[in-house]
Image (tube, rainbow, N blue to C red):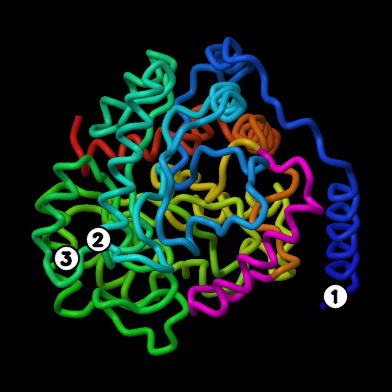
Amino acid sequence: MSEERKMDAANRRDFLMMAGAGAAVAMAGPSPALAQRPAAGRWRNAIIVNALGGLSNPNVFSKGADSAIQRGVRRRRTLDARTLADAHASGVTAVNCTLGYVAGEGDPFEVTISDIANYDQMIRAQSRDLVKILTAADIVQAKRDRRIGLIYGFQNAVMVGDDPTRIDMFADLGVRIIQLTYNPANTIGDGSMAPQNRGLTPFGREVVERLNQNRIMVDLSHSGQRTCLEAARVSKQPISINHTGCRAITDLPRNKTDQELRLVADRGGFVGIYFMPFLDLDGSAMAEDVVRHIEHAVKVCGEDHVGIGTDGPVTQIDDLESYRERLAEEVAFRKRSGIGAAGEGPNTLPFVIDLRGPTQFHRLAELLRARGHSRLQIEKILGGNFLRHARTVWGG
């Protein structure tokens, strides 16, 4: 490591230590009336789509409760006032939320159906703020109505089991994005941490065909390289990689090679850059790393195919020191279960420390603007490119 790189890494560690030294902040959010206040600033009118994220308040945590991924099931959902206020303040128009089984206990199919029902109930109960996204036109309408659009997506396709006709049912229930694999291998193909790096299985090809028939977005995040390349080639519709980084900059398995990025773009697809530690080899990714990866992806893919998929919520964690204890438990579980990835660890925060909270999207836009990107280019990255891809796949 060069002396300059060592100094940069030390500066990052110092920043993280200072950020984590603060005491817990009061967790009571703004009044519900604030949830209807539009985002202010230069990017107020931009459509912002988080191609993989979520809405939650990570500060609300019951001591001793397992995480959702460990339980394999989810309780009935509702979003508190702070979560809604932060989402509206951030300007986010729509977000791809992970529903259903990823790993852990429970039957994947049953867990997934239950989770879809929970989300449907939550949207009905909070319809003033939330709307279910089924077409690209719904995203545009959500912006007009000042509601947050929820896109139903899976981060593993194991709930399909051995029956591809289940995909028809998921489509009817409003699922619009299905990621083929998580980090390990499954019956469809290999994830990014599967050592064999096999491509799509014969069953995987059936699944891709069925997803195309139902106009469900095929997501190759977390996939192994061969699985990604083969799916991009056999899919009759453009595919997406909704949350990733660029391996040419940071050589970690969760990031995509230029070959993968270029093929996805050449076939009309979409690539979302995440706000995750995998953007930096030391695991302490900063906003400048997000910008570097976005700019590299634009160079490889072109400005019409790159966006953002943060892989995190809008509401930030107030007490980082307490959070580290929970994080260590989660990382240990992921390792035991075989679903962890190279580049994550108990001391690696799964977000970008200086690009979080309700200002994260507008701050990114300003950083890109300072780098000389035009307003049109920035608005494409914030959500326009995802919207274009959604129109191609979903219609509307």
Residue occupied by mark 2: 109
Q: In the rendered image, which residue does mark 1 sit on?
A: 2
Residue 340 seen in the figure: yes
Mark 1 or 3: the one toward you: 3
Q: Residues within 10 Å of mark 1 (few under 14, many from 20)?
A: few
Circle 1 SS class: loop
Q: Is residue 283 left or right of residue 55?
A: right
Q: Amino acid at mark 1?
A: Ser
Q: Which residue is mark 3?
A: 207
Residue type marked 3: Val
Asked if marks 1 and 3 touch (Cβ < 8 Å), the reply is no
On-image quarter of the N terminus: bottom right
* Residue 142 falls left or right of residue 40: left
Category of crowding for the residue at label 3, using alpha-carbon neighbours closer than 10 angstroms: few (below 14), some (14–19), many (at least 20): many
Secondary structure state at the residue bearing disc 3:
helix
Residue in front for this viewpoint, 328 or 197: 328
The main secondary structure of the magenta stretch is: helix
Residue 392: horizontal and vertical position, in percent?
22, 41
Tell me the amino acid under the disc marked 2. Phe
Q: Give the answer, above or below, for where 38 lies relative to 188.
A: above
Q: Residue at x 56, y 30 (%)?
A: 374
Q: Quadrant of residue 83?
A: top right
- Counting residues from the start of the chain, the first of labels 1 and 3 encountered is 1
Total residue callouts: 3
Task: Write the start and end of the magenta stretch as one range.
Answer: 316-345
Which circle's residue, 3 or 2, is located before the other in the chain?
2
